[in-house]
Amino acid sequence: MLEARLEQADLLKKVVDAIKDLVQDCNFDCNDSGIALQAMDNSHVALVSMMLKTEAFSPFRCDRNIALGINLGSLTKVLRAAQSNDILTLKAEDAPDVVNLVFENSESDRISEYDIKLMDIDQEHLGIPETEYAATVSLPSPEFQRICRDLSALSESVSIECSKEGVKFACQGDIGSGSVHLRGNTSVDNPEKNVEIDLTEPVSLTFSLKYLVNFCKASGLSKNVKLCLSSEVPLLVEYSLASSSYLRFYLAPKIGDEE
Amino acid sequence: MLEARLEQADLLKKVVDAIKDLVQDCNFDCNDSGIALQAMDNSHVALVSMMLKTEAFSPFRCDRNIALGINLGSLTKVLRAAQSNDILTLKAEDAPDVVNLVFENSESDRISEYDIKLMDIDQEHLGIPETEYAATVSLPSPEFQRICRDLSALSESVSIECSKEGVKFACQGDIGSGSVHLRGNTSVDNPEKNVEIDLTEPVSLTFSLKYLVNFCKASGLSKNVKLCLSSEVPLLVEYSLASSSYLRFYLAPKIGDEE
DNA sequence: TTTCGAGGCA
DNA sequence: TGCCTCGAAA
């Protein structure tokens, strides 16, 4: 059986909010290393990969591998019932029909409990190769969100260009064009505002802004976001969570005419 | 003639907001004890009963009984013109064609005045028997609103079950099931958060969540809400206002198959 | 599809 | 209290 107690229900809420527009139904794969999720969006352009390690829970117990096939819309409805500092416990039997969510509010004597029916989901498990990226950019997640939102007003696509000068987000649209340049900088005072660029080779790729804007819904999960780019491979957008848990998005670049 | 001065126009605004989706047209019955309203919703499942005692006004003058038949949609439009701390004075002749609303903003020297045409409304006056309820639950109105909202995401109906252990709101739906348990508790520190359960007999009844959610629009009128239940009689949902004025909703339980 | 209003969250 | 997001109506 699975029994996983998450001190802050908020975490799961934010994760699900960030991915529910990309993926409708998906498996939460539970085993003794934690809870993982991997799914492609409907148009097979983007991939979401979440890992919540056992350390994110206390306690965490999962006797054997369980795949919980959940409709994220239903999960969202239930998670909406979580109040800000509720403690969430996920429970499931070994061959479950439902997953059970219990919200405890330590202050009031309020316990709410929900069962969500599970579904069988055929999941092609994708091995994601560990790639050495030509460029890695780490920046404050609100900054990235802002850039994507601003540029999406002008165009469908953005080019991300990393060079030793910095990183440049640029787009052209009917009403004009726009670009945002960030130079790498590290300030001890404000480590949250650092922009770190790690470059082995200059790279320039173009991506759909619609997807990037979508990924940015995860901004609340982490102060920083890491963008990893290499020519002709999908962009990795990573939000690190506590205890080496993470939420990652992969997005295939636009090629040639698509741009 | 009627002349009733309400220090806070907001009060009437909130009352009308809370009932306008249930009732389109209704009489405001004015007499020397105050202003009362009683109306069934269109489907005759719910009943609204409001009482604003003379003490809620200063001054209050009403020489003889007057029934002001008002379209609540029109009243809403006019009340929307009220600013947050406007003082509202209602005026009507003895055999009125219109009711006159005057908004005064004490700070600025701003006076606005509206007339709403009245209508003749046949009103069956329902004697509501004073019932001894098997169970009375008093809880913070935002909590009740929250529960109704959360559960309405899952189902059309909620069962409310009062026992000596506490009160349990539960529902089943297509995507799963949910329940919220509250234990009675009284804390001197946080009297607003108290959940008080007064029980002569356990009771379990099922109600339409759509209506309950609607009633909860009155949450802004009072910190607390009182639920009174007995088998086979309508649920009473009461919001107490200052000086023993009140806004009450009655809702017939669902029976048998309906659940 | 676009706009407006209402409700929820910070 | 103000902002933002979601849902409903045009």
Image: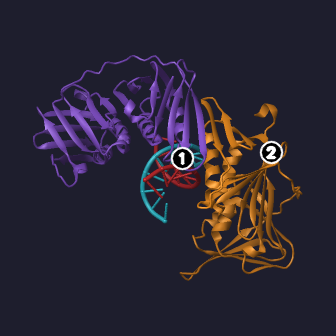
Chain colours: A purple, B orange, C red, D cyan
- Helix, strand or loop under label 1: loop
Figure check: B132 above or below A3: below
Give the position of the N terminus of chain B as an image quadrant.
bottom right
Depth order, front residue of B214/B259: B259
- Amino acid type of the residue that numbered disc 1 sits on in the rendered structure: Ser
- Residue positioned 17% across, 38% down in the render: A161
Where's residue A42, x and y in %? Answer: 41, 25
Where's residue A146, x and y in %? Answer: 31, 48
Q: Label 1: which residue?
A: A106
Residue B231 is left or right of residue B171, and the answer is: right
Figure check: A237 above or below B29: above
Where's residue A202, x and y in %? Answer: 12, 34
Structural crowding at the residue carrying mark 1, measured as other residues with C-alpha within 10 Å and reported as few (<14), some (14–19) or many (≥20): few
Image quadrant assignment for residue A14: top left
Q: Label 2: which residue?
A: B252
- Helix, strand or loop under label 2: loop
Where's residue A116, x and y in %? Answer: 57, 29
Image quadrant assignment for residue B58: bottom right
Q: Is residue A208 visible?
A: no
Q: Chain of mark 1?
A: A
- Amino acid type of the residue that numbered disc 2 sits on in the rendered structure: Ala
Figure check: B142 above or below B244: above
